[in-house]
Image (cartoon, coloured by chain):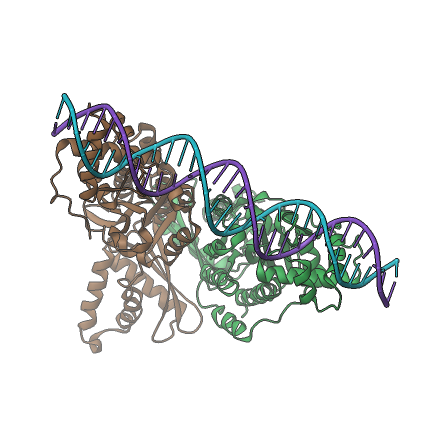
Chain colours: A brown, B green, C cyan, D purple
Amino acid sequence: MVGRTGETQLNPRAQRLLKALVELYIRSGQPVGSRTLTRQSGLDVSPATVRNVMADLEEAGFICSPHTSAGRVPTDLGYRFFVDSLLTVQPMDASDVRQLSIQLERDGGTTELVDKASTLLSGLTRLAGVVTLPRRNGGTLRHVEFLPLSERRVLAILVLNDHDVQNRVIHTEREYSAAELQRLSNYLSAEYAGREIGSVRELLLEQMKADREQMNSLMTSVIDVAQRLFADEQGEDEDYVIAGETNLMTFAELSDVDKLKELFDAFERKRDILHLLDRCLCADGVQIFIGEESGYEIFDGVSLVTSSYRAEGEVLGVLGVIGPTRMDYDRVIPIVDVTARLLGHALNPNS
Amino acid sequence: MVGRTGETQLNPRAQRLLKALVELYIRSGQPVGSRTLTRQSGLDVSPATVRNVMADLEEAGFICSPHTSAGRVPTDLGYRFFVDSLLTVQPMDASDVRQLSIQLERDGGTTELVDKASTLLSGLTRLAGVVTLPRRNGGTLRHVEFLPLSERRVLAILVLNDHDVQNRVIHTEREYSAAELQRLSNYLSAEYAGREIGSVRELLLEQMKADREQMNSLMTSVIDVAQRLFADEQGEDEDYVIAGETNLMTFAELSDVDKLKELFDAFERKRDILHLLDRCLCADGVQIFIGEESGYEIFDGVSLVTSSYRAEGEVLGVLGVIGPTRMDYDRVIPIVDVTARLLGHALNPNS
DNA sequence: GCTTAGCACTCTCGGTCCGGGAGTGCCAAC
DNA sequence: GTTGGCACTCCCGGACCGAGAGTGCTAAGC
């Protein structure tokens, strides 16, 4: 679905004009005419010449005119070529970098950090910021605690990585006393502390294969409880945090309330957005979806600039911003890039 | 700021016409003319007579016309009189009640329950649902656990009421070893389990007054840690959960994007909304704020229908819906009322 | 004195028309 | 290949108009 812009060869002048046109349109929001473009491009040619080039660009699908006698506007394909080949990104504003690095220092739980990243993204870009929650796989088990609730329900408290606490209610095979659960907590904490959550699961599976007859009662209980505790680890739903959606309401191209509602509903529904973000997970560096390239109608007129964030070389999640197709890519891209690096850094368990 | 409608005496016919007018306007969204109103009210009078009455109602401030030759529209004051004196609420749809009572059964944490209540409110009314998080004061301490983090940071895990787990990071006066913290956990859990969180704080304060010299080292540590743990209990920020905001985007009277943005910004900012919800906290039964009665400009054209919810006679929080002034009060009010009762019931620790 | 029919008046809304402005496409000349 | 010229198209805002809806007032009727 991503446009292949290599097939059409554009001569340098045409590229230069396309670049100027897109930049101008991003700044003004108005269709760009040949006259304005001539002045803006810095080329020493007449409007008539520019008109000829524009006709070519239109035929190639990079620009189009809303109606006969308006100027030209970039198409999704035009933006694609622009961000792929023409864009010169600005380095990030120094004070913004400082703000980011100060704010994105780990001092609380992961959720707080993700929230903050999302808010910062939206604040710096004045668009909507999204950050997926980091995948849990990489966590190191620190401590486990069990508490009996009513009947066969047990509250499990997992502490991971010094930072994060997870609470889960599990339903056990039989009822356990507080003392029994205390013993289980002690055993698991002693045995598995410091290990990756993933490897804990594997170890447990291995032990389960051993003949149950040979186990003592402690081990049977461990298997019963811990297996239920770690079982659904994998199937945990992905989720993301979004901030500053209301920023999107200021853009003229999104002033249609119905369209806006569909977009906001999609944010609330989460499924489509998550699916889209997933597709950015493996990519390295900044990824951009322009308009309906994404395959979703709701994204007509809307772009998504993302980057995966990673710690210790492992991809943890994706973050980015959502805004109108007509956004300041040159300013937004470095912000997304830097935020992804800083968030990854902050989530690094060794930092 | 709440309108006092008792001062103006309206004869029964005027009341009947006002009632018909408001109902009609709520249904149609169009200004109501004398002709339509005559037919609708069921009164056997001519449009001219109705016009005279309407002129009176306008003079009294209950209705107004958008322009000379449009019909009449209720003012905030008109709505106020309507909900105070004229409204006949419909009993709630039986299947809706069933849905509510099934869904609002406690089976997870408090947060999940509050989320669900908010979503249900918005789903049933097709408006935005809000629910404040219940105040914690009423919690019964179940268990305390401490874990050392880096340096003088300690992770405290509080289990309350069998349902809820809170994690807090506290900064202690000196560094504690894991074993020390274990002893503190044991002591506090043994000593204070089953008590109200509030009374725990009081007990601690009492013990602090005792001469420190006489304390053994365990008690000194208990005071150091526990005091920090329970200190900020009081100052905990209020918060609320909102759901279905996008429902508000379908109403013609809110189709102005700028106005909509201001409202959504207020939802995100939370302060004003919280302040407004606080004012409903003490009131018994369903409370209604109509338009700018609330004192906030953003609420122009927007109404808030709320009810406090309580368990064991104690007020825990407020829930309600936000929608256009022109909403189906007769349908919405019972939904808010019943949801409040059911949520209160679900949060009752003895249930 | 309340109610009513009649009527002139006002205002909105949608449609049409028009001129100015912006921009295009094409052509012929360089 | 580039350029100036020119006719053409289209949008936009303003003016205008008629239909429709509803009002306020007045004078007549019960």
Is residue B189 visible in the rendered structure shown here? yes
Q: Residue at x 33, y 41 (%)?
A: A106
Left or right: residue B34 versus residue B247 is right
> Residue A51, position in %: x, y?
22, 33
User: Which residue ends up furthest to the bottom in the rendered image?
Assistant: A213
Pick whichever, A284 or D7, lies toward us: D7
| Image: B197 above or below B103 | above
Pick whichever, B272 or A2, lies toward us: A2
Left or right: residue B142 versus residue D29 is left
> Residue A267, position in %: x, y?
37, 54
> Residue C10, position in %: x, y?
66, 45
What number of labels is visible? 0
Residue A10 figure quarter:
top left
Is residue A119 visible in the rendered structure shown here? no
> Residue A65, position in %: x, y?
28, 42
Q: Quadrant of the C terminus of chain B?
A: bottom right
Q: Residue at x 51, y 59 (%)?
A: B127
Left or right: residue B347 versus residue A45 is right
Q: Residue at x 38, y 39 (%)?
A: A126
| Image: A33 above or below B184 | above
